[in-house]
Amino acid sequence: MASDLLRAIPLGGVGEIGKNSTLFECRDDLVLIDAGVKFPDERLHGVDLVVPDYTYLLEHIDRLRGVLITHGHEDHIGGLPYLLMQYESPEPLPIYGTKLSLGLITVKLQEHGLLNKVALESFDDGDRITLGSIQAEALEVNHSVPGAVGFVLRTPVGTVFFTGDFKFDPDPPDGKTTDVDRLRQIGDEGVLALFSDSTRVEQPGWTASERIVDDSIEQLIREAPGRVIVTTFASNLGRLQRVIQSDYRLGRRTSVAGRSMEESLRVAERIGYLNVPEGSMVELRQVASVNPDKLVLLTTGSQGEPTSVLSRMAAGEHPLVKVQPTDTVIYSASPIPGNEETVAHSIDNLFRRGANVIYRAINDKIHVSGHASREELRQMIDLLRPRYTVPLHGEFRMLVLYRELAMEAGLPSKNVLITENGDVVEFSEGEGRVANRVTSGAVLVDGLTVGDVTKVVLRDRHRLASDGVLIASIVVDHESGDLLSGPDFISRGFVDPSQDEVLDDARVTLSKSLDKALRQAHESGVVANRIREVLSGFIYERTRRRPMILPVVTEV
Amino acid sequence: MASDLLRAIPLGGVGEIGKNSTLFECRDDLVLIDAGVKFPDERLHGVDLVVPDYTYLLEHIDRLRGVLITHGHEDHIGGLPYLLMQYESPEPLPIYGTKLSLGLITVKLQEHGLLNKVALESFDDGDRITLGSIQAEALEVNHSVPGAVGFVLRTPVGTVFFTGDFKFDPDPPDGKTTDVDRLRQIGDEGVLALFSDSTRVEQPGWTASERIVDDSIEQLIREAPGRVIVTTFASNLGRLQRVIQSDYRLGRRTSVAGRSMEESLRVAERIGYLNVPEGSMVELRQVASVNPDKLVLLTTGSQGEPTSVLSRMAAGEHPLVKVQPTDTVIYSASPIPGNEETVAHSIDNLFRRGANVIYRAINDKIHVSGHASREELRQMIDLLRPRYTVPLHGEFRMLVLYRELAMEAGLPSKNVLITENGDVVEFSEGEGRVANRVTSGAVLVDGLTVGDVTKVVLRDRHRLASDGVLIASIVVDHESGDLLSGPDFISRGFVDPSQDEVLDDARVTLSKSLDKALRQAHESGVVANRIREVLSGFIYERTRRRPMILPVVTEV
C-alpha cells in the first residue's frame, strides 16, 4: 500500500496580498482554510472584487469536509459567497469559525441569500474538529480583529501549524496573549510544516502593542478642544469598543457613521462581544444636540474611499456633519498599499477645512499593525521548530524574505517551500516538495456576474479609458453600393465636443476615401476595415492618440 | 505715489507635488521661477502630462523679464515647452539656469523644435541677474541633481529667499555643502519672505547624507557574486557618476540601459560635468563579452514604469539582458507616491527570476532623499529669520505642517502664508497677505494636443473604463418609420463576446419596445432616447453594470 500523502494547495494569497484560501487534502478528505477576496488594483477597470478560481475544489467538492475560518476579515471570508454560488450539493457545507467570524459571515451570506447552503459551526480556543483524516485544533492568536485563530492540523502524515494572520502582542488590552507555551508544546510534539503569515516580513523587529494605540487615542481625545472624529477599519472591533469606553470615561458620547462600521458593531453586539456602557452612544442624526467637546464620531473612510462617510465630510458633502476648525480627526489606520493617494487626498481636504488632522506619518502611536514583524515571525519558527515552512499571505518578495528568515532560524533553503497560487505542496514520509499544479487564478466579479470580465474585456476597457471611442456610421444601398447616409461620427472620451475640428477634417478625408472604396466593393466587412484604417491613420497623425474606432456599416 | 508692491503667485506646486512654477511681479516686471510638469494620477485617464495654466502670465507676457530655473528636474523644467508653445513674442525669452539645467532644457526644447524661441543664459553660484526691478542672486544648494540653486530676490519692497528643492548635506561626496554662512549673512541683511520647499516636512530629523549611499552601493557591488544592476533616477547625475567610478575602482565596467539615462549622461558629458575614466564604459549590445562579475548595469525603471528597461528585464522581455539567479539588483530610489504598486511588481518579478534584490524597505542606505527634512527646514528659517514664510512644493497637509514648524521657530501664525495655486501673495511696506486670485489650474497634455481633454472627456473615459460601451444601431425609413435594419449591437469592454446571452436577450426586449415606439414617433432623437432607456434599464437589472449606451439611429 502506498504511504499516506498530505497535499496543501494555496488557491489564493501567495504572490499577492489578499484572497487568502488554502486547500488541504489527505486521503479522501479536503479541508479549505479561509476563502478571501481581494480588491482590484486600477488596472482591473470596473472590477468590483477578485476571488480565487475554485475549479479544482469544485471538481472534488464531494470530498470537502468543511471550511475552517481563521478570522472575519474580507481577505479571509469575502470569497465565501462566490464559492457557495457554485456549490450545488444538497448537503449544507460546514463552515467552522469563532462566534465573531461566524457572525460576520452570517451577514454576508444573508445579503447574498446563501445562508441555506451552509451549516455554521462555532468553536472556541482549544476546540478540536474532526474532518475525516484531518483533525483541526484552534489556537487563539492576536490580530486586528477579535476571535482570530491559527490551526493545528493533525494528519496521518504529520502535524501542520497554520498561523492565519497573527502577531505576538505582549500586552494586549484584552489580556489575551498568543499562547507561547502551547505553541512550544505543539513544537515538542513535532511539527512537519509551518504555514505562516509573511505579510510584514519586510518590517524589522516587533510590531508594537495595541495598548499604545488605546493610550494615545485616549490622550488625544482628552486634549481635543472640540469634536473628535476617529476613523479606523470597521472590523477592528477591539479598538472600536475601547474608543467607546475611553469616550465614556472622558465624559463624551460616541456616534457611529458608516454602514460597514454600524454593521460590524451590530454583529458584535448581537453575539455578546460588545460591551457598551448605558447611554454612551448617540445616533448620528442627533449629534447636533451634543456639545462638540462632548462628542466623538467613529467613522469609516480610513482608506480614503471616495464614497465613504469621512471622504464626504472632508469634501464638505456630508448632510449631517460639517467639519469645523475646532475638530480633531484621528486616522487610526495605515493606507493599504494602493490607497496612499486617496487617503492623502482626504487628509488634505480635512486640513483645508481647518481641522487638526493626526495621521500615521506624523504620529506612529495611533495605529499598529495586526501582523507579526520579522522577529515575531522568527519567534513562531523557534517555538514550533518545523521541518518545513510554507510562507503564505505575501507578495512574492515577502515569501523570498521569509525564506531568508527561516534559513537564519536554521532551516535548509530547500525546506522553505515557496509557491505560487495553484502549486501543490506534497508531504509524504516526512519529506515535502512542490509537486505539480492545479487550475487556479483570479476570477473577477463585476456587478452581478462572475467571470465574464475576461482579458479581452479588460484590454478594451483599458483602451477606451486611454483615448475614448469614435463611432463612424454609414448606410449603404446593398445593391448599388451607393452611400445612403453618413459618414456620421459619435465620439466619447476622445476630444471635447466643443473642439472637434479634428473630427470635421476627418469626415472630409473619410468621405473622399469612401467614394473610391465603395466604387470598388461594398461588402460591409471590407468597407468597415477601410473606415478603420483611414480614420486611425488620420487621427493618429493629427493628435498622436488612438481612440477605439468602431465602424457601423449598415446595408439596406 | 502709491508705495511699491511685490506680488508672488504660485501657478503650480502648492496643494500638490509637481508642476512647480511661481511668478514674481514688481513694478512693471514679471519673473517666473521654474516651469514644471506633473505626471497624471490614474484618475486622469490617457493624460500624458499636466502643466500649469499660464493664462495670467500670457496676458502680461510683454512684462516677463525672464525665467529663472532652480534645477533640471522635470517638475521644474518640464512645462517649458508648453509655455513656449504659447509664447508669441518676436524676442526670444531669456531662460537663466546653471550649465547642467540649461543642458537638460536644451535637449527638451530641441525635441519640441522650440529652441529658437529662447535665449539661454547660464549663471554660476553667486552670480547676480538683473531683471528690471528684481535682482536675483543664485546660491547653490544640495539636491539630488547637480547644479541646483536657490535665489535671493532683491526688490524695492524687500528681499525674498526662494529655496528651490534643497537639503543641507553635511558631507556631500562633491564636497559642496549648502553655504550656511552666506545664508546667515542674507538673514542679517533682512529677509522679508522665505519661499520654502516643504515636500519632506512630515519627516522628522535630518535627511541622511548622499555619502552613505555611495558607500553602501560600493560595498554591495564589492560583495556581489555576479552582475550588478543598479537603478536610479536618470537625473541623479552625481550618483550615476560615482557609481561609474566605484565600478572602475572595483575592476568592473559599466553599461547604461534606458534612453533617458543615456541622454542625461550625454548632456552631462557634453558640458564637461561628467568625469568617466577611460575604458570604464561598455555599450549595452556588447555586455555579453564582459564577465558578469566584471559588469555593472545602470538602468532606468526605478519607478516600475511598465515599458522601462528594468521592467522589461524583470518580465524576461529584454532582448539583451536576461536576469540570472547570480544577479544583484539595487533599487537606489524610493517609489514616488502613486508608483508603489508598479515598483513592487517589478521587484517581485526580479525575485521570481532568482535575483537578489536590494530595495529601500529592507536597506535604507541605498537611497536618500534630495529634500530637507523637518530639522533642515527649521534650520533654513533660523538662518534667514524671515518676517514671512510661504511654503511651496507640497500637498496641502505639508503646507499646514510647515506652518506649525515656522510657528515653533517663532513666527506668528498669520505670517505663514498658505496658498492654493493662483493665489496672489502681496507684500507692501513690510506687510504680506494673500490678496486675491488669478486664473490658474491644470492643463492636460494628451498626445500632440494641449487643453482639449476637458472634464467632459475625462468623465466619459472614466465611464468607458468602468463598464465599456454598447452601440445599438438601427436604420429607419424616414417617411414610413419602418425599421429597415437592426437593432444591431457592437459592444466593447462590457461582456466577453463569447458570453453574450445578455445581449441576445437585450435585443429581443429592445425589438419589442421599438415596434411600439416607432409606431408612435420616428424622430431620431426620440427613438435614440427610447433605445437608451430600454437598454440601460434591462442591462442594469441583469448585470448591475452601466455600460455607456450609444444609439445610432439613421433615417434613409
Image (cartoon, coloured by chain):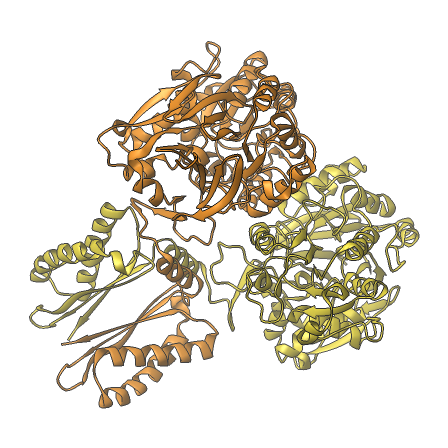
Chain colours: A yellow, B orange
Task: Name the residue nearer the viewer: A142 or B62.
Answer: B62
Residue shown at 38% from the left, 49% from the top: B439
Residue B511 relative to residue B303: left or right: left
Quadrant of the image occupied by residue A83 = bottom right
Of residues B55 and B224, the one drawn nearer to the viewer in this rendering:
B55
Camera-side residue: A193 or B459? B459
Q: Residue furthest top?
A: B278
Task: Report the side of A106 relative to B553 (left or right).
Answer: right
- x and y percentages locating residue A142 in the rendered image: 82, 56
Quadrant holding the N terminus of chain B: top left
Q: Nearer the viewer, residue A160 or B186?
A: B186
Residue B357 position within the rendered picture, expressed as x and y whole percent measured from the top left = 61, 34
State the image quarter where residue B32 is shown: top left
Quadrant in which the C terminus of chain B appears? bottom left
Residue B133 position by quadrant: top left
Q: Residue at x 56, y 47 (%)?
A: B396
Number of marks present in the image shown: 0
Does residue A64 appear in the picture of this structure? Answer: no
- Can residue A388 be seen from the camera position used here? yes
Q: Would residue A167 appear left or right of A470 to someone viewing this image? A: right
* Residue at left offset 76%, top offset 45%: A373
User: Residue A70: where, in percent of width, then height?
Assistant: 76, 62
Q: Is residue A243 left or right of residue B224?
A: right
Q: Tell me residue B181's x, y (percent).
A: 61, 17
